[in-house]
Amino acid sequence: MSLLHIGEEGWIVSHLQYLNEMYKRVRTNESGFCALGFNKMIFEINSQYLRQNQIAQTVQETQNSATMHGRKKRKRSQQLPQKDLEEVDHVKRAFGAMMSAARGKGLFCRNNFLDNNELARLASMKFYQDTYSLKNENLYGSNDTDDAIVTEVHDKKYVFPTKCTFYCYDVRDIEKKMELSNQYDFILLDPPWWNKSIRRKKTKCAEASYKMMYNEELVKIPIRKLLHSNGIVAVWCTNSSNHLNSIFNEIFPSWGITYRAKWYWLKVTQAGGTICNFNSAPGKQPYELLILGSAKGSEKDKVDIPDGKLMISIPSAVHSHKPPLTGANKIIKEYLPDEPKCLEIFARYLLPGWTSWGLEILKFQHLSLYEILDECRNGESNVDSIGSENECKEQP
């Protein structure tokens, strides 16, 4: 079960287990059914993350500390505003309580092997290199069957979860390609926020970069036309005050959404430590944010969506590979109908029963990322072809 722990403060999730559960029964063209496992090396996070230049800088600073003592320029001391310090303190306390309960259940008992996540780094770099040339834009398709399936797209093999639909288009085309009839109960977005780090990657490592969008462009997405009158919207966000202010003051109001809650995704190592230290000054934190809202005037305004919840998981080494919120994890389930219609915009991988929109939605579906865990089981089914049941069409 990928939902490892439920507590008053939140949830502990195994993203890797979720992916493996999704594909424990996969129908193939060649030989019936098999079970697939996602490349576990991508989740081999055994220590706090340091970039190679940070390691070199740390060594250099240590070597120079004696000779530079007293002469090194001091950076101006900065402290977070009081409300932000209180927020960090809340997350730290909730995290401590959850990890104490988790260790009592035998979770995160692995000993650290500190190599700065070398295996995960190598696996993620191979992923970037293998998928950089995959161009699947202007493509849509679906798997309408009750089985996960393997099929070909542009002469490459991909695995598709059950009952999924996908659109590989630019988000600016969403009004042209998708029905706008207030049909979705839950809409999740992981926007490609504009940031300096990704801009630097574009010049140093094009494979690891992606197309970014300005906040002004996000406002134009027709969320209110897609969302059911009692629907919920959730937006993944960095800790950037600019992006947060834009959500609260521009994006949500333009979409007709009322802010409801802020949740925190805590990223931890396999031994349960945070992937970086909590910071009391402006800088990196070991968490990202999930901002939740509901349609203005909806019945959801009367439903208590709790604030300050934590989701804890070992992160993928690949940028923006977020943990799931529905399905086997059921994190958001109690706030949705029994069989919700769910849409993810800027999706990076497909989910069972969901509609997914984005330019990169097939990259994590590429069969090279999976290994056969269980060979085909004879007698369950005899399937010669899945082409007629999986629709995948290219448009100009």
Image: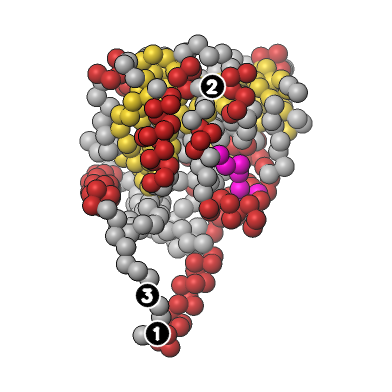
Mark 3 in CB contact with mark 2 (< 8 angstroms) = no
Q: Considering the numbered disc 1 on the image, is that residue within a helix, a strand or a loop?
A: loop
Q: Amino acid at mark 1?
A: Arg
Most foreground residue, 63 or 148? 63
Residue 141 % position (x, y) = 65, 20
**Magenta stretch bounds:** 207-213
Residue on which the image places disc 1: 71
Q: Which mark is residue 222?
A: none
263 magenta-colored: no
Instruction: Tell me which label, 1 or 2, sits earlier in the chain.
Output: 1
Name the residue: 30% across, 29% down: 260
Q: Can you say whether 177 is above or below 43 in the image?
A: above
Q: Secondary structure at mark 3?
A: loop
Mark closest to the chain's N terminus, 3 or 2 = 3
Q: CA distance from mark 3 to mark 2?
A: 51 Å
Residue 167 x, y percent position in the rendering:
62, 24
**Which of 395/127 is in front?**
395
Above or below residue 88? Residue 222 is above
Quadrant for the C terminus in the image: top right
Q: CA distance from mark 1 to mark 2?
A: 58 Å
Pair 3/2: label in front: 3
**Label 3 sits on residue:** 74
Residue 296: give x, y in percent of width and height: 34, 19
Residue at the disc numbered 2: 355
- Residue plotted at (58% across, 19% down): 175
Distance from Cα at disc 3 to Cα at disc 1: 9 Å
